[in-house]
Image (tube, grey):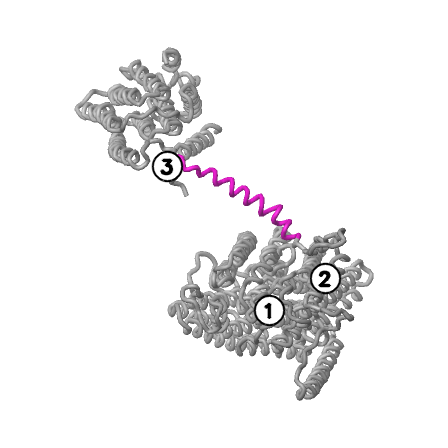
């Protein structure tokens, strides 16, 4: 536990050192070093915690207004802590270089920063460290009040990080949306924990858990729904995702890594933690009257997955595509959790273990490949200054390393075997199949097969979406002068991307061992009530070994082919020739597939879900003028929220401005009315 | 105006027994049985009725010169109240107190207001936010409210308090109404003074318990406030070239 405190002290030290140094490069290098050291120590700590038979506890005698500073790191926390440490360390190392690149970009001349318009280094470093520390605190807090404080700090700090230059009005809008969404979520959580601590008469998680075992919660269903809403906002599950595309698309690369790679996971962590608090044996023996919890989780997960990937498919901005695909991946994890609940309740232990392990592995994988993709998108943006897919193209020849990393990331996120995304989805498929087999005789096999179909089709759609993104950006010919002059980013970003790519490959090769590790730690925590050794998963392990072996073989073949090709083209050098033009004499870059035309057919088939808006001009004249066809797919759940909730609230708020008229008379009138009303109420109606 | 005044006289006739009217049954009997020991009950009731009438006249008054005179009249009546509400023998302390109140409420404050008024350049009277008749009717509404309120108050230890209560609340409400409806800063100042008079009325029944000292301190604050307002109003006039408070609306964010 001392190591955990040491990492926290390091992070806080880095934060305040950065604040103290204020400007200059050391204000960024010091927190970067602190983050890197904390990451190393933290990953070591996680490994240690996973090797312990049970969780680690500690408390600090810090005075809190309510509750206490209780720390507890069990296996679940440790599983979630690993990506936090890994990515905050990586992002921290990248931070000084990213900030410098941002400043260069704003000046327009490479190597030159504009005075006055640049980023406040101290502030940026400070909040980056604080965000990392707060995420660690959230995962290790074992007291409701302490947890909420950490949660609030974690929710608040990205507000200062998303738009470091604070110039773009669009970025500013994104930041405000983020802040509002984060606080709506925090409000719900506040309600939830307030009710729980009143019922249990304590704010400690341990006491709450034993309270749940002994007397049970009143209104547990409502509490569960509150938790799902509060944490679902943070996880970006589909109807509650409105902040995500804005914030993730605006954040610079190293911040997006933290936001997308780790902070979303904490939403999932919250749901899992609350499940263990509300029903300690949720994953082994869920009461029959609580089956709807699992149905709800599965429903939200399925909706989020399908909807997220469909909107990702329709985006014209690269980073927004990535943000919507986060909603998809969080949906898949949520779906697996719900299915695991149901499987556990029906006694399908095998399915439960497989689904949970799949969810955890997918969470890790998502952290890795989404960070990789965001860094790649950042590199593309840096070299071309655009993120709109319409203006990019043909980048593979210009920035091959970025292109290669992005290709790997896209393949991984689209669950192409045998990369890591496929490995975790494989576990989900297996789990769903076993679930349906074990629950034969009830109505549940249908649900499991339905989810199987959902996961499969989402994987297919993801393949489509990321083929589109990668193909339009990196293949073909450049569509704009910016993409013609693209250059590779600096070495540090390159090595960051390479590290993540290697980790993606590593996870796919090490999947069998990671699966055993996750299974072991799940049995120690969530599934501790089920007797050990009752389920034999050797076949799954065997399957994973085979796939890992296949991955190794494929990797070897691929590198062999690459080497052969490289040596063959070594002498002649890469040539550039136009795409096959069907005999047309004057081909231009505008003839290529555009984002809209690529996804048009699918958008039309899935019209009820995606609700695309098409505007295709009809050609009537003999000599038609230049015209444009436009397809857009608005985010209709967000629009629905806007219409039902945000617009009325803002109209009401706007109206209340009338109360402040500036006239003394009116203010006194308010006092008058209040006085008469108070007197009437206090004495009149007695 | 005459019509209004004749109407007010009728109202006053109705209002005089007003404090007694809503107090029902046995309670009223008890309250006024103990009040009957008061040597000057009739005078006291007359004075309270006059206070209510001056309130209504102030609400009806359009000219500020008239308002200042009415405030002076109300001040004199209120200054005499400690003497009228007193039950025991008249001692030097009481006389001293009465003189102080008479001096400040009846003489000093009206003189201060008059001085401020004279220093302001002559201006057209601006339309109030509520017409005079409507103001008077609202004041009557306030009177009804306070009577109803007093009837719901229940038993109090001090019967004098019950007698004073509804005129006091009427005066406070009339003061607030004045502030709300008038546009000129000086007219609003009248409102504050009338409001203070109402609060003072609530304090009078406590005269035996030496609570008048508290009143005296409040009065001192009001006196200072009148000075400050006098200066402020002149500065407002300089800055905005008017004492209409609706010009302040430009100060809001």
Name the residue tied to disc 2.
Answer: A597
Secondary structure at numbered mark 3: helix
Secondary structure at numbered mark 2: helix
Of the numbered discs 1 and 2, the one sitting upstream in the chain is 1
Marked residue chain, label 2 = A
Q: Where's residue A224, x and y in %?
A: 63, 55
User: In the shown orientation, is residue A518 left or right of residue A95?
Assistant: right
Q: Residue furthest front?
A: A623
State whether residue A414 is above or below residue A645. below
Marks 1 & 2 on one chain:
yes
Marks 2 & 3 on one chain:
no
Marked residue chain, label 1 = A
State whether residue B40 is above or below residue A659. above
Is B76 in front, or is B217? B76
Q: Give the residues drawn in magenta, as a range.
A: A636-663
Residue A130 in the magenta stretch? The answer is no
Question: Residue A442 sits in which quadrant?
Answer: bottom right
Name the residue tied to disc 1.
Answer: A481
- Image marks 2 and 3: residues in contact by CB distance under 8 Å: no
- Number of the front mark, 2 or 3: 2
Q: Where's residue A89, x and y in %?
A: 52, 74
State whether residue A545 is above or below residue B250. below
Is B104 in front, or is A191? B104
Name the residue tied to disc 3.
Answer: B248
- Image marks 1 and 3: residues in contact by CB distance under 8 Å: no
The crowd level at tag 2 (other Cα within 10 Å; few <14, some 14-19, many 20+) is some
Q: Residue furthest right?
A: A441
Marked residue chain, label 3 = B
């Amino acid at each position: 536990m001392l190591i955990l405190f040491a990492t926290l002290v390091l992070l806080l030290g880095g934060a305040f050192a950065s604040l103290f140094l204020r400007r200059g490069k050391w204000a960024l290098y010091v927190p970067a070093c602190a983050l890197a050291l904390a990451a190393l120590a933290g990953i070591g700590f996680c490994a240690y915690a996973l090797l312990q038979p049970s969780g680690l506890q500690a408390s600090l005698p810090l005075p809190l207004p309510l509750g206490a500073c209780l720390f507890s790191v069990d296996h679940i926390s440790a599983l979630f802590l690993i990506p936090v440490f890994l990515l905050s360390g990586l992002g921290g190392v990248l931070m000084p270089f990213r900030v410098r690149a941002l400043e260069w970009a704003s000046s327009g001349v490479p190597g030159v920063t504009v005075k006055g318009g640049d980023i406040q280094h101290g502030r940026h470093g400070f909040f980056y460290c604080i965000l990392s520390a707060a995420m660690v605190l959230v995962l290790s807090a074992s007291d409701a009040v302490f947890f909420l404080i950490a949660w609030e700090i974690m929710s608040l700090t990205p507000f200062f990080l998303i738009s470091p230059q604070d110039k773009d009005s669009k970025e500013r809008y994104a930041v405000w949306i983020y802040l509002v969404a984060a606080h709506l979520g925090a409000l719900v959580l506040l309600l939830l924990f307030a009710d729980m601590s009143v019922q249990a008469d304590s704010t400690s998680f341990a006491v709450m858990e034993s309270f749940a075992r002994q007397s049970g919660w009143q209104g547990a269903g409502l509490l569960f729904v509150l938790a799902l809403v509060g944490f679902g906002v943070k996880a970006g599950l589909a109807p509650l995702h409105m902040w995500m595309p804005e914030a993730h698309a605006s954040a610079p690369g190293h911040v997006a890594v933290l936001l997308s790679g780790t902070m979303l996971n904490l939403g999932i962590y919250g749901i899992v933690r609350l499940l263990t608090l509300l029903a300690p044996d949720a994953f082994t023996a869920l009461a029959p009257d609580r089956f709807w919890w699992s149905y709800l989780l599965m429903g939200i997960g399925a909706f989020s997955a399908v909807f997220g990937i469909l909107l990702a498919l329709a985006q014209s901005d690269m980073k927004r595509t990535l943000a919507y695909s986060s909603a998809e991946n969080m949906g898949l994890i949520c779906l697996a959790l719900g299915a695991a609940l149901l499987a556990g309740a029906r006694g399908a232990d095998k399915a439960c273990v497989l689904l949970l392990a799949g969810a955890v592995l997918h969470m890790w994988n998502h952290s890795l490949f989404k960070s990789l993709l965001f860094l790649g998108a950042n590199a593309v943006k840096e070299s071309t200054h655009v993120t709109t897919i319409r203006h990019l193209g043909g980048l593979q020849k210009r920035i091959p390393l970025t292109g290669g990393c992005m290709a790997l990331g896209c393949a991984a996120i689209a669950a192409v075997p045998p990369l890591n995304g496929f490995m975790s989805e494989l576990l989900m498929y297996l789990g769903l199949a076993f679930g349906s087999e074990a629950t034969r005789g009830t109505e549940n096999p249908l649900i499991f097969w339905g989810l199987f179909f959902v996961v499969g089709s989402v994987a297919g759609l993801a393949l489509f979406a990321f083929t589109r993104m990668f193909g339009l950006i990196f293949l073909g010919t450049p569509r704009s002068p910016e993409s013609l002059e693209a250059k590779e980013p600096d070495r540090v970003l390159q090595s960051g991307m390479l590290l993540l790519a290697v980790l993606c490959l590593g996870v796919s090769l090490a999947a069998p061992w990671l699966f055993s590790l996750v299974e072991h730690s799940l049995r120690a925590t969530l599934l501790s009530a089920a007797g050990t050794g009752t389920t034999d998963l050797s076949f799954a392990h065997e399957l994973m070994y085979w796939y890992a072996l296949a991955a190794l073989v494929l990797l070897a073949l691929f590198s062999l082919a690459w080497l052969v090709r490289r040596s063959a083209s070594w002498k002649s050098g890469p040539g550039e020739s136009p795409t096959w033009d069907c005999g047309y004499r004057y081909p231009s870059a505008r003839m290529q597939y555009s984002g809209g035309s690529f996804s048009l057919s699918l958008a039309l088939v899935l019209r009820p879900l995606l609700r695309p808006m098409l505007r295709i001009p009809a050609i009537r004249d003999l000599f038609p003028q230049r015209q444009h066809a436009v397809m857009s797919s608005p985010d209709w759940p967000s629009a629905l929220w806007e219409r039902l909730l945000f617009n009325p609230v803002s109209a009401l708020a706007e109206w209340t401005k009338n109360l402040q008229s500036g006239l003394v008379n009116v203010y006194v009138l308010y006092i008058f009315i209040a006085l008469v009303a108070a007197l009437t109420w206090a004495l009149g109606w007695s | 105006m005459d019509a209004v005044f004749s109407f007010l006289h009728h109202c006053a006739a109705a209002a005089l027994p007003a404090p007694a009217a809503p107090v029902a049954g046995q309670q009223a009997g008890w309250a006024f049985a103990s009040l009957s020991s008061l040597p000057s009950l009739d005078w006291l009731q007359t004075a309270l009725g006059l206070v209510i009438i001056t309130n209504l006249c102030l609400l009806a008054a359009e000219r500020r010169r008239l308002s200042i005179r009415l405030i002076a009249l109300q001040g004199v009546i209120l200054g005499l109240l400690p003497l009228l509400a007193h039950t025991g023998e008249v001692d030097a302390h009481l006389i001293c107190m009465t003189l102080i109140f008479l001096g400040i409420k009846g003489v000093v404050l009206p003189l201060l207001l008059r001085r401020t008024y004279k220093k302001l350049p002559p201006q057209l009277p601006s339309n109030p936010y509520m017409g005079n008749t409507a103001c008077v009717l609202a004041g009557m509404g306030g009177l009804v409210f306070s009577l109803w309120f007093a009837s719901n108050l229940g038993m109090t230890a001090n019967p004098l308090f019950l007698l004073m209560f509804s005129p006091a609340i009427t005066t406070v409400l009339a003061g607030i109404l004045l502030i709300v409806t008038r546009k000129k800063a000086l007219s609003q100042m009248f409102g504050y003074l009338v409001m203070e008079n109402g609060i003072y009325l609530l304090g009078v029944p406590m005269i035996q318990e030496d609570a008048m000292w508290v009143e005296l301190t409040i009065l001192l604050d009001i006196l200072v406030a009148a000075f400050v307002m006098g200066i402020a109003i002149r500065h407002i006039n300089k800055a905005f070239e008017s004492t209409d408070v609706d010009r302040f609306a430009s100060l809001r964010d």
